[in-house]
Image (tube, rainbow, N blue to C red):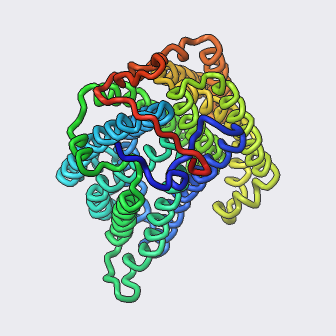
Amino acid sequence: MDKPSRPARQSTDLTTGRIPTTLLVFALPVLGSNVLQSLNGSVNAVWVGRFLGEAALTATSNANLVMFMILGTVFGIGMAATILVGQSVGAGHWDRARAIVGTGATFFFISALFAICGWIWVDQILSLLGTPADALPLARTYLRILFVAIPAMNFLSFVMTVLRGAGDSRTPFLFMAIAVVLDIILNPMLIAGIGPFPELGIAGSATSTLIGQGVSVVAILITLYLRKHPLRLAGPDLALLKPNPRILKIIIEKGIPMGLQMIVISASALMLMGIVNSYGSRVAAAYGIAAQLWTYIQMPALAIGAAVSSMAAQNVGAGRWDRMGAITRTGIAFNIVLTGALVLALYLFDRPILGLFLIGDSGAIEIAAHINTVASWSFILFGVTIVLFATVRATGAVTPPLIILIVSTLIVRTGFAYAMQDRLGQEAVWWSFAVGSVLSVVLSIAYYRLGKWRSVRMLEDDARPAAGEPPDTGLGYPRQRARFTEDGK
């Protein structure tokens, strides 16, 4: 079997070395990718708002909501494949890892159906959202182009997540940067027709996203093949693009609950937004800005959670259960320090920061500052929950985290906001974040300590093989032992 060349540049063995250093080095590029994605959305909104006005901005907001829901449906599939790849790489099963990539990749080709269906039924989709009449033609044009971009967006996301599962977070960051930079640069040029580019209006904003994602996905695939990355499919391995039924079954069974977690969070957010809107535009504006700032506050926890998930999955595959507790504790410590630092900075400088968004509206600024005071600290606790979820998911225990999220977020948090409105008014919404976060962290700790996640198996060959015997992997692919280390040895 062929051995990968120059392995140190392509992957990192997450089963050895100092856990704090390895985890932090791995998490930083993931954090950078998250920041770039949020920055991309913010900058593009500025371009659209300045060049095309409020109706166009409303159109992009409605279209982006549709895209978030569609991308959320495949998020869990990508995460399941990532965990499987991580476990396989940790165990040294590179043949099986390629089989997982092949099956996962063919599943993502199905996203082309989303593009076709979305193009055909775009008006019905926007009508269901209640898109304002003045924004409807703009939203139709914008969303149709984004539907064309869906296959590239999904496939790029899939490639980046499986690379992280194999221990490489730097390459995904690099190609995410390429996509974002292209999008930001081309956005105003294609909107306004600057230089040699045609004036496309709102279609130009969507086209810049299509170009950025398309160029990046082609570039990352070329790079992986030029590097002869061990996860690339070449020669006889191209046959792995035919889905393996057993792998596909695992990916779907484990991926659906993880995808549903995003839907639960979105549903709770939409329900709370409905309550907030009932208190008028000033309160809604204040809450909207606070929520934007919370997106940045949560980024360290999300990055650390992704790093913990990849590291834990590799260690599960390698049978290094002695490291799992330390990985989890280190992730929690990093989350408390980094998320806590951002929360503290927001407390100290909330009014100057809010003033960047709410110019001249002192009333809304005061409301937003109060919302932050009541709710921001709870994201430290929610970050702990994210890290605990990341650890238990690495074994394949995906349903209990979903149940915990449904109970704490959809039932308790949203239920508290509705039930306490008569007594607390709008304060019920702000305090619901604290109530939900406290419950989620308590339930997560209880499951981490008492649950049976350590006995959950995604693969069928977790038992140690007899000496000198390369066992069947349980999926029809032989065991291949190949570790990557920082020095390439």
Answer with left or right where residue 3 lies relative to residue 365. left
Q: Residue furthest front?
A: 468
The percent coordinates of residue 348 (x first, y second) are 82, 52
Q: Residue furthest bottom?
A: 195
Q: Measuring 51% from the left and 40% from the top, which residue is drawn there?
A: 483
Quarter of the rendering occupied by the N terminus: top left
Q: Observer-nearest residue: 444 or 233? A: 233
The percent coordinates of residue 208 (x first, y second) are 38, 69
Above or below, comparing residue 345 to residue 89 in the picture: below
Q: Measuring 54% from the left and 12% from the top, which residue is drawn there?
A: 452
Above or below, comparing residue 34 to residue 190 in the picture: above
Q: Is residue 83 visible?
A: yes
Q: Measuring 57% from the left and 12% from the top, which residue is drawn there?
A: 451
* Image quadrant in which you'd find residue 98: top left
Q: Observer-nearest residue: 7 or 454? A: 7
Above or below, comparing residue 430 to residue 181 in the picture: above
Q: Is residue 213 visible?
A: no
The percent coordinates of residue 259 (x first, y second) are 41, 33
Above or below, comparing residue 40 to residue 88 in the picture: below
Q: Observer-nearest residue: 109 or 415? A: 109
Answer with left or right where residue 192 lies relative to residue 148. right
Q: Residue furthest right?
A: 348
The percent coordinates of residue 216 (x first, y second) are 40, 63
Answer with left or right where residue 120 lies relative to residue 312. left
